[in-house]
Image (spheres, grey):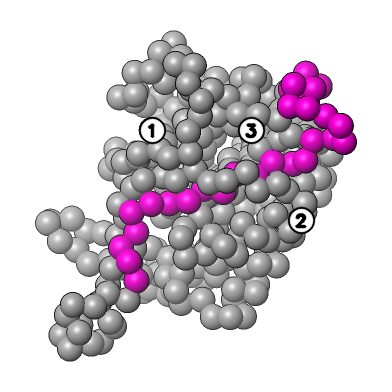
Amino acid sequence: MKKEFSAGFASYTLEKALVIHADCFAWMELIPESSIHAVVTDPPYGVKEYEPEQLEKRTNGSGGVWRIPPSFDGHVRSPLPRFTALNNGERKQMKEYFSEWARLVLRIIRPGGHVFVASNAFLSQIAFSSIAEQGFEFRGEVIRLVRTMRGGDRPKNAEDEFPNVCSMPRSRYEPWGIFRKPMLNGMKVSDCLREFQTGGLRRKPDGNPFEDVIESERTPQKERGIADHPSLKPQSFLRKIVYSSLPLGEGVVLDPFMGSGSTIAAANAVGYSSIGVERMDEYYQLSKQAIKKLSTIVLKDAQLELSLS
């Protein structure tokens, strides 16, 4: 990985990865145009719950805008962002946030490059419309089928009065928006592949097309023990997304909201070059051990593992 991509920020390299300690907005202003082939990321939704003050409250167990789901079956549930706590002003702020982010991504990604953005059913319409309005083509969604602890609650402070009512449906899926930077005028996908190594998605290792519904597990405790991040996604899912993002298996995958490095670990596992950018020092430091450990986890998906051997 080219060291000049660090743009003067603190960084380190690990295998084919460059990990940078920076705010991604400032970093994206500095790197060359059309230098990234794909983006795979899980943004800090609502912005609000990932501010330092709110993260400190979560760490101290004092709540903030984080909701602690009920404990049962002997398991203590991890805190979840209370997306429904956002008011209209905060939703407006979110729209502006994603609009500016998409503007910067559009500058640095190659024509035909794909962007995968994790979301949730409650807020995806805000984020996805904001990204598309900046000039990206909306190419659909990947539906991660996974049962979470979000939703399904009885009316707050009236649980006994309305025992047969839930305020929102229990979530059983997670939508990931798929976007593509428009190809140059007159270009076909084959032209874009030849010139920019972008334009399409990589087929699965068995030769079948990449599919937009993926059955997924919740993140295993083993992985959470390695990388303690509130929105950590499992390697069994991330490796499939990352693998599909480079149609020719070559180029650079970027995660501008890296967290503790799970997407970068997935890129290392499938043999891709990658760049991770993280502004929170706690997670940047954690990534120095977490990326290597996560990338060496052996999955049960024999078809994907076969392609990497």
Give the farthest residue toward the left.
73
Q: Amino acid at mark 2?
A: Gln
The residue labelled by disc 2 is: 134
**Looking at the picture, how far across and down is residue 152, in whole percent?**
28, 68
Left or right of 154 on screen, residue 160: left
The residue labelled by disc 3 is: 253
Which residue sits at x=58%, y=24%? 202
Badge 1 density bin: few <14, some 14–19, many ≥20, Cα 10 Å: many
Which residue sits at x=65%, y=48%? 138
Residue 122 seen from this side: yes
Tag 2 or tag 3, which sits nearer the N-term? 2
Which residue sits at x=37%, y=73%? 63
| The C terminus: image quadrant | top left
Determine whether the residue tagged by mark 2 lies in a helix, strand or loop: loop
Q: CA distance from mark 3 to mark 2?
A: 21 Å
Image: 268 above or below 126: above
Left or right of 114 on screen, residue 190: right
Residue 5 seen from this side: no
Q: Amino acid at mark 1?
A: Ser
Q: CA distance from mark 2 to mark 1?
A: 31 Å
The residue labelled by disc 1 is: 236
**Looking at the picture, how far across and down is residue 24, in whole percent?**
69, 50
> Which segment is the magenta one?
168-195
**Looking at the picture, how far across and down is residue 21, in whole percent?**
64, 46
Determine whether the residue tagged by mark 1 lies in a helix, strand or loop: helix
Give the farthest residue toward the right.
185
**Looking at the picture, how far across and down is residue 30, in whole percent?**
82, 45
Q: Are marks 3 and 2 in contact (CB under 8 Å)?
A: no
**Mark 2 or mark 1: which is in front?**
2
Residue 266 in the magenta stretch? The answer is no
**Mark 3 or mark 2: which is in front?**
2
